[in-house]
Image (cartoon, rainbow, N blue to C red):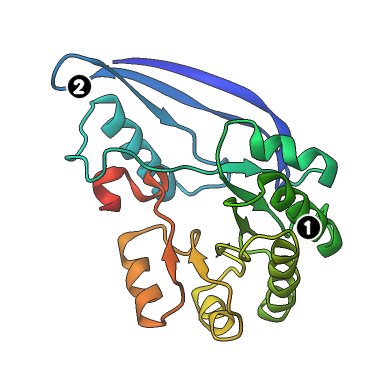
Amino acid sequence: MEFRPFRIPLTTRFRGVTERSGVLVRGSGPDGAEAWGEYSPFPDYTPERASRWWAAAMEAARGDWPAPVHASVEVNSIVPEVAPDAAPAHALANGCRTAKVKVGGRDSSLADDVARVAAVARALGPGGKVRVDANGAWDVDVAQRALRELDAAVRDAGLGGLEYAEQPCASVEELATLRRRTPVPIAADESVRIPGDVDDVLRLDAADIVVLKAAPLGGVRACL
């Protein structure tokens, strides 16, 4: 195997992070085809959490994939916490019809978030879908108000409201409480980082959707 360290500056700062660093792993699959994995945990991760990222990188570098379930998977564009007039370009850059808009950041007010989401919804137009991601930034009361205003902004743009809100609150308990207070579907992301976390989400009926990320969970097989 070949290991290539990298360090890449971010074009838009995210939660205080200005660059991503890690290691690209070059290997080969069972059929001899070239395969690549990426190891890039955040600097504040514990060795235990980082080890799952390494497992995912090695799975990819070995081409050790389970059998496909779908022939293709739709993806979304990601709109960082930028000014509203800059948001449509991020939403439309790669041809996606669904956009995930970052909200709840330290550098943005709720009014900023609403304006950004509204701009994206208008840019996508009929048939477009908007989801938001707060990365656990809000408490339940703030999240309830924010989702009401964000959902209204999407509806005012002629779309059917928010597709869902990803990790609006930090804890599973908060997600469960919020889910009973809002019609916006709730997705759990950071709340699911080891297999047992899904049990907590199900037990508390805390989410409509679970976001499965291969690297934090230890690879595609671990996700499944």
Mark 1 Cα within 10 Å, few/some/many (few <14, many 20+)? many
- Location of residue 56 with respect to 4 vertically, above or below: below
Determine whether the residue tagged by mark 2 lies in a helix, strand or loop: loop
Residue 224 or residue 4, whichever sits in front: 224
- Location of residue 205 with respect to 121 vertically, above or below: below
Residue at the far left: name it.
31
| Lower position in the chain sequence, tag 2 or tag 1 | 2
The quarter of the displayed image where residue 132 is located:
bottom right
Disc 1 residue type (three-letter): Asp
Task: Tell me where residue 43 appears, x and y as whole percent.
Answer: 57, 40
Q: Can residue 166 be spotted in the picture? A: no
Going by the image, does 194 lie left or right of 5? Answer: left
Total marks in image: 2
Position of the N terminus, as image quadrant, is top left
The quarter of the displayed image where residue 111 is located:
bottom right
Residue 98 or residue 213, whichever sits in front: 98
Going by the image, does 222 lie left or right of 193? Answer: left
Residue 142 or residue 118, whichever sits in front: 118
How many angstroms separate mark 2 from mark 1 (CA)? Answer: 43 Å
Residue 78 or residue 156, whichever sits in front: 156
Task: Tell me where residue 133 appears, x and y as whole percent.
Answer: 62, 57
Task: Tell me where residue 12 appears, x and y as whole percent.
Answer: 73, 35
On the image, numbered disc 1 is attached to which residue?
113
The residue sitting at 29% across, 44% down in the picture is: 220
Determine whether the residue tagged by mark 1 lies in a helix, strand or loop: helix
Mark 2 Cα within 10 Å, few/some/many (few <14, many 20+)? some
- Location of residue 9 with respect to 218 vertically, above or below: above
The residue sitting at 35% across, 32% down in the picture is: 57
Q: Can residue 112 be spotted in the picture? A: yes
Task: Tell me where residue 67 appears, x and y as whole percent.
Answer: 17, 40
Disc 2 residue type (three-letter): Gly
On the image, numbered disc 2 is attached to which residue?
29
